[in-house]
Image (cartoon, grey):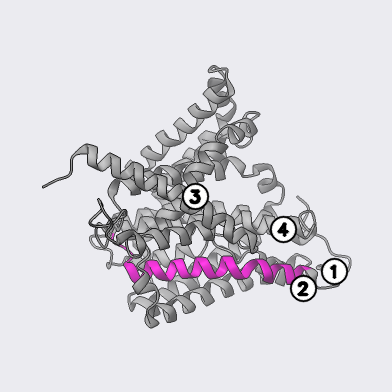
Amino acid sequence: MSESITDIMSRLALQIGFMVFAVRCCGNLVKKIGIPSVLGELLAGVIIGPYALGGVALPGFPQGIFPFNTPTLAVSPELYSFAMVASIILLFASGLETDFTLFLRYSVAGGIVGIGGVAASFGLGALAGTFITGESFLSAPCLFLGIMSTATSVGITARILSDQKKMDSPEGVTTLAAAVFDDVLGIILLAIVIGVISVLDTPEDGVSAGEIIPIAAKALGIWLGSTALGLVFAKRIAGFLKLFRHPYDFSICALGIAFILAGVFEKQGLAMIIGAYVTGLSLSGTDIAAVIGERIRGLYEFFVPLFFAVMGMMVNVGSLLSAQTAVFGLLYTLSAVLAKVLGCGLPTLALGFNLRGALRIGTGMIPRGEVALIIAGIGITAGILNEQLFGVVIMMTLITTIVAPPLLSLCLKLPAAARKPKSKLPAP
């Protein structure tokens, strides 16, 4: 017997209520010990999810408050849809906060470092995937493991640089510029990978290098075309939004554009978050960007932590604690760390930095975050990632986010300059 709409909605309301308190408590708790709140929110989801306490039978809830749905989608479709709404808000805000002027100004140094990091991360991530899955380098799971290894959490790195008063140092500026490039390149790469996977008959299938070119060209063309149009018509879009006059009105309408473009991108075989990011990036240079960011902050603070909780709920605790998953997770994490340290650090030696500066920049690019989790969520719901691979990605995200702050702080405290004598960054 199927549930009535009343039962479904009442359960969803209860679930969201419990999640709000869980993410706030866990988020604030880990912040007190110097760990980013996102990890607390993720762990809150693991604890109250269907694989843990959420599946325990209670009076009135014979299957638990968060009953298990299916191996592909552990939570209810309604709750997952709620999380996808949150992911659109998250990527819209990320695009809105992207300093496109900084992106262009330090395009040489940031571009070289960013490209090096993305190339190394994707290559080593997919290569690690071949050992973990036993499938080819160009199979869908390996491609996803590659793309999930590329994303850098800009917020965590920026916080550490700010605390150490290194935000405007040569290594600080280069790291942040490279992180912006990392985000943009990662979004482009995601578009290409999603385009490639959309033509596969099954997730286990692979494609030849020759087949990737037209698929990549289409995905890249859609992304670049929409981004270029957005930047060209940004002022006109802002002018249209200002017709709504009140800041709250035009801010919510801007978010509405992000949802529309997210749906269009999904219909074109790309990910919704790409459309949301393009919308935010297009408006980032307008005079209303700061106002929009401020006005949607409340929505962001409410929705986004719940997204991380839902991602945590999809982690099979039993699988995560297995010896095989632990070994695979450590292998994948090691490849992710080395990729950033070497891929981002080594190119800086040609930009006037010494080994100390290269180490600081490479270490600053280690932490992964929200984008990796969003891509992992897409992968498991599409049947590309199984529970074990999803656990491997969660482990990598947790470890890199935990170890990066103390490592970067230690590197920044090392005495002596980060650059070679009489050297400077390439002129912007």
Q: CA distance from mark 3 to mark 1?
A: 39 Å
**Label 4 sits on residue:** 174
Point out residue 399 in the picture as x, y percentages from the top left corner. Answer: 54, 70
Q: Position of residue 65 (x, y in %)?
A: 31, 53
Quarter location, residue 362: bottom right
How packed is label 2: few (under 14 Cα within 10 Å), some, or many (20 or more)? many
Q: Which of pointers 2 and 3 indicates the residue nearer the eye?
A: 3
The residue type indicated by label 1 comes to Ala
Taking the magenta stretch, the answer to whether it contains residue 41 is: no
Question: Alpha-carbon distance for marks 1 and 2?
Answer: 8 Å
- Asked which secondary structure carries label 4, the reply is helix
Q: Which residue is mark 1?
A: 417
Labels 3 and 4 touching (C-beta < 8 A): no
Residue under circle 3? 305
- 350 and 88: which is toward the camera: 88
Q: Dots 1 and 2: beta carbons under 8 Å?
A: yes
Give the mark nearer the N terminus: 3 vs 4: 4
